[in-house]
Image (spheres, grey):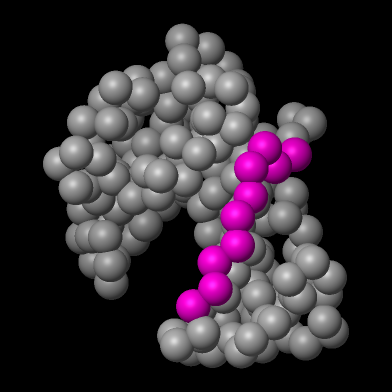
Amino acid sequence: MEELIDIYDRDRNLTGETIPREGAFLHEGQYMLYVLFIIEAPDGRMLITQRSMEKHWGAGWWEIGGGGVRAGETSREALTREVAEETGLDVSGLELAPVYNYVNVDLARGDNYIVDIYHIHMDFSLGDVQLLDGEAIDARLATWDEICALNEQGVFMHFSRVQQTLEAEGLL
């Protein structure tokens, strides 16, 4: 089934346009919405997953989770869905709001988007995590130093965004 996305303006207002996500080319002033999430266990380690080797880009790299907001969804609804799909964890009962966001504009590639990043603190263990086939091949709980080491090896996605989020929260 074709996944549709809503189009937003720079101020996050819905434009009323809905288009297929696959092959979407966004023009100046058009944005789609994404969510990323940092899930932190009580011991301060963060859940990271290793991308499937079938991924078009970043195959085998480590990352925090996230995905696109579907047409008709809010950022928070997409977060709940993406966390459940990618990790099997349920955050529906938690009070959550984005702690950091950023805007990307790439007019040449039509790749304009707004990203909300959530920092979720919850009690879970690695045994509670269920990976989605085709998305991830491994998961682990990592300290900030371990994430930095993966970044230095060139195999961690969204590192600067995780760092900016933690800095914005006063955690780094």
As drawn, 119 above or below 34: above
Left or right? Give the position of 53 relative to 80: left
Identified at 79% across, 31% down, the residue is 95
Percent across and percent down for residue 20 are: 61, 87
Q: In this orientation, does residue 161 appear?
A: yes
* Residue 164, image x, y percentages: 50, 39
Front residue (pair 82, 44): 44
Q: Which residues are magenta?
A: 97-106
Q: Decide if residue 131 is in sight here.
A: no
Q: Name the foreground residue: 66 vs 154.
A: 154
Picture coordinates of residue 84 (x, y %)? 57, 45
Closer to the camera, 3 or 143?
A: 143
Q: Quadrant of residue 70?
A: bottom right
Count of number-bearing discs: 0
Q: For residue 105: magenta?
A: yes
Between 21 and 8, the residue placed more toward the observer is: 8
Give above or below for 122 relative to 97.
above
Q: Residue at x 42, y 31 (%)?
A: 47
Is 24 a magenta residue?
no
In the displayed structure image, the side of residue 44 where residue 69 appears, left or right: right
Residue 6 position, x and y percent, is 73, 77
- Furthest toward the left, the residue is 153
Q: Quadrant of residue 169?
A: top right
Quadrant occupied by the N terminus: bottom right
Residue drawn at 45 percent across, 88 percent down? 108
Q: Report which quarter residue 142 is drawn in.
A: top left
User: In the rendered image of this protein, does residue 16 appear above or below residue 58?
Assistant: below
- Which residue is at a point 55% across and 37% down the rendered structure image? 165
Residue 103's place in the image compared with 164, above or below, is below
